[in-house]
Amino acid sequence: MDKIIKTSKTIRAILKVLFWVVAVVSVVILAAILVALFMKGGTALDGGFSITLGNYSLLLNQEYSSQQLTSLHFMTFANVALFGTLSCYIIRVLLNVFEPMSQGKPFSTTISVALKKLAYAILIMGIISFVLQIATNLIFYNVFDIPSLFNADRVESCSISIVSDGSFIIWFFILRLVGHIFKYGETLQQLSDETL
């Protein structure tokens, strides 16, 4: 039991530091994006913009104004804001999971509830990630006019293929299962306490 307590305290300390690192980095990136969003006039990128397509990198020589790139800045802002917020929430939930463990109560009633919250947070994060990936790719496709980058005589059409990593669904079910296991352990602990 001492190893569980010691390990839980160490994990909680690491998670507390990680929480503040994620929060500070997210705020700094959001501030930088806001500065880029509200820059007026001039060119945001003077050519030399690189697009990677599989194993190929295309170096564009066209200039893009800050107005042309506004939608990309908004999508970047949305991505950082949502993922920063959800990451901080997930870390807080993990802190709630390890708190009773660090006090020597591995089958506290708060753990199964926290695991349920964690499972749904990961599911929501996966769904939002997929939706934002689609939106970002569509905006990228339109802002840089991807079909115009290729020789029309040689390339008949250009399309986007978006593939989602469905591992978040697997993690959702694993965490729900672990939550049920802890709920069963809580019930056994309660029955044990009542018989003593």
Image (cartoon, rainbow, N blue to C red):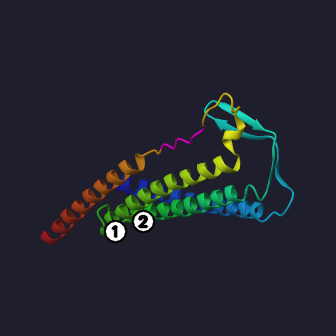
View extreme (right): residue: 42
- Residue 14 on image: x %, y %: 53, 56
Which residue: 21% across, 64% down?
Answer: 189
Give the numbered dot on residue 110: 1
Q: Are marks 2 and 1 in contact (CB under 8 Å)?
A: yes
Magenta residues, dominant SS class? loop
Compared across the picture, whether 172 is left or right of 48 comes to: left
Report the magenta residues as a range. 158-163
The residue indicated by pointer 2 is: 96
SS class, disc 2? helix
Q: Residue at 66% of width from left, 37% of height from top? A: 52
Q: Amino acid at mark 1?
A: Thr
Identify which amino acid the numbered label 2 is placed on: Asn
* Sequence-first disc among 2 and 1: 2
- Residue furthest to the front: 153
* The C terminus: image quadrant: bottom left
Q: Is residue 54 visible?
A: yes
Left-right relation of 137 to 95: right
Give the percent coordinates (x, y) of residue 64: 79, 50
Report the Cα–Cα distance between label 2 and label 1: 8 Å
Please state the horizontal and vertical placement of residue 100, each as a whole percent of the image.
Answer: 37, 65
Question: Front-most of 3 and 123?
Answer: 123
Q: Is residue 181 left or right of residue 165?
A: left
